[in-house]
Amino acid sequence: MRKPKLILILITLAVILLSGCSTIRSIGKIPSKERRAEFAVKYPNFINNEFRNLYDASDSLIYVDTTRIRKEIKMRKFTKRPKLSQPIPSVKTNLKDITFNRPTITWFGHSSYLIQSQGFNILVDPLLTDYASPIWYFNRSMPGSYVYKIKDLPPIDVLLITHDHYDHLDCHTIRKLRKKNTHAVVPVGVGSFLKQWNWKSGHMQEVYWGDTVDLAPGIRLISTPSQHRSGRWLKKNQTLWTSYVLEIHGYRIFIGGDSGYNKHFKDIGDTYGPFDLAILENGQYNLDWAKNHSFPEQTVHTAQDLRTRMVLPVHWARFAAAYHTWNEPIKELLPLMDDAGILVTIPLIGEPYTIGDPPKTEVWWDFE
C-alpha cells in the first residue's frame, strides 16, 4: 500500500473515532426488550416482535413494466455513477443569512433537505457526511454531490426523521446537532438511536401513524404511513417508518420518505390533500426492492393519489445503491409526469425552491 493512501486511511479513522461515531456506535442498538413489549400492546402493526406495513405488499409491482426492466438489466451496461470527469452540478447557497416568506426547500442530494419558512427551519433526514454506511469507505457520495455540512446551516428548529436506514439517519450528523437546542421528531423506536448518540431526551418526540405535533404557531406535522422497512443490522423492523404531512404557514407539503406503492397514498390524499408540493422518492429501485421503493411509473400514480400540484423528486443524484444509471430516475419520470399534467421541480443540489414559484426545469442531469 502506498504511504499517502495509508496516511489518508489513518487520518480518516482518527476523525471517525474522535467524532464519537465508530462503526459499532453508528450501527446503534434497537429498542430494548421492555420497550418492544410496550410496542406489542400499544401499536396494532407491531406483530410477532416486528412492525409491519399497513397493506399487503404482494401487489407492489402494479403499474410497473417488469418485462422491460428485466430486459434492460440483462442487456444494458450500467454506469451507476457518473464519470469522475463530470461531477454532479450543485450550488452553495448562503442559507444562514436569508429568510423566505413562503416555504422553501433546499435539497442536499438523496433524501436530505431543509425546509425554511418565515424564519422557521426544518431539517429532514440529514446526511451531511460523505457516505451512507457505518464504514467510511462504502456507499460514498457521487463526485460534486456532497457540498453542505452542519456549519453551513442556519439554526435548526426541528430535526425530522422518516426511518432508521443509514441514508436517512446518520450518526455523525445527529451528534453534531445534539447540542443545538433542536427539537427532534422521529418514528416510534428511532429515539433509541438518538439517545445512544447523546441527544437531549427532553428535545425529542416519537410519533406513530396518525399522531399530530404542533411545532409552532401556523406549523403542524402529522405522521402518516409509508410502505417500507427498518433496520441497521441483522434485526429488522424494530422501529417504525413513516411519511409526514406538513402544514406550514398556509401551505401543505407531503414528506414522503421511502415507500413502495400501495393504497396508503390514496388514503393520505383523500384525508389530507390536495398538496401544494409532494417530496417523493424517485430512485434506488429494482425488482428485489419493489415492496419498499417506487419505480418512476409508480411515482406518477403516487402524485395522482396524493392530489399534489407539484412534485420534487428525491432519493437520487448522490448515492448509487441500485442497478439503474444515476440519472435514469429523472429521465424516466419527467415524460410520465408531463403526460399526467403534474408539474415537477428539479432544483440543483443546494438551489432553493420556493412553493408558488415556477418549477425549476433546467436540464442539468443529461450526462453519463
Image (cartoon, rainbow, N blue to C red):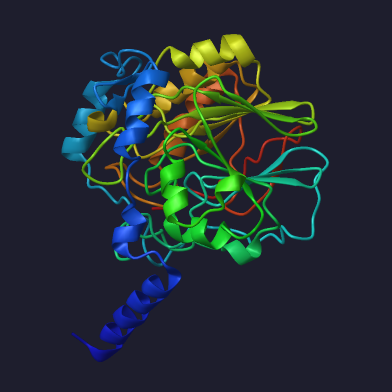
Number of callouts: 0
- Identify the residue shown where x is 56% and y is 57%: 178
Residue 291 x, y percent position in the rendering: 30, 25
Instruction: Please tell me which residue lies in front, 330 or 133.
Output: 133
Instruction: Please tell me which residue lies in front, 163 or 90.
Output: 163
Camera sees residue 128: no
Instruction: Please tell me which residue lies in front, 61 or 335.
Output: 61
Camera sees residue 160: yes
Q: Is residue 292 above or below residue 320?
A: above
Q: Is residue 97 above or below residue 328?
A: below
The image quadrant of residue 222 is top right
Left or right of 118 in this view: 61 = left
The image quadrant of residue 262 is top left
Q: Is residue 174 above or below residue 290?
A: below
- Seen from this angle, which residue lies furthest front? 34
Residue 18 x, y percent position in the rendering: 42, 75
- Identify the residue shown where x is 43% and y is 40%: 190
- Identify the residue shown where x is 27% and y is 42%: 323
Instruction: Please tell me which residue lies in front, 64 or 130.
Output: 130
Q: Quarter of the image for the N terminus: give it.
A: bottom left
Left or right of 216 in this view: 33 = left
Q: Is residue 121 above or below residue 230?
A: below
Residue 214 x, y percent position in the rendering: 70, 30
Residue 265 x, y percent position in the rendering: 49, 17
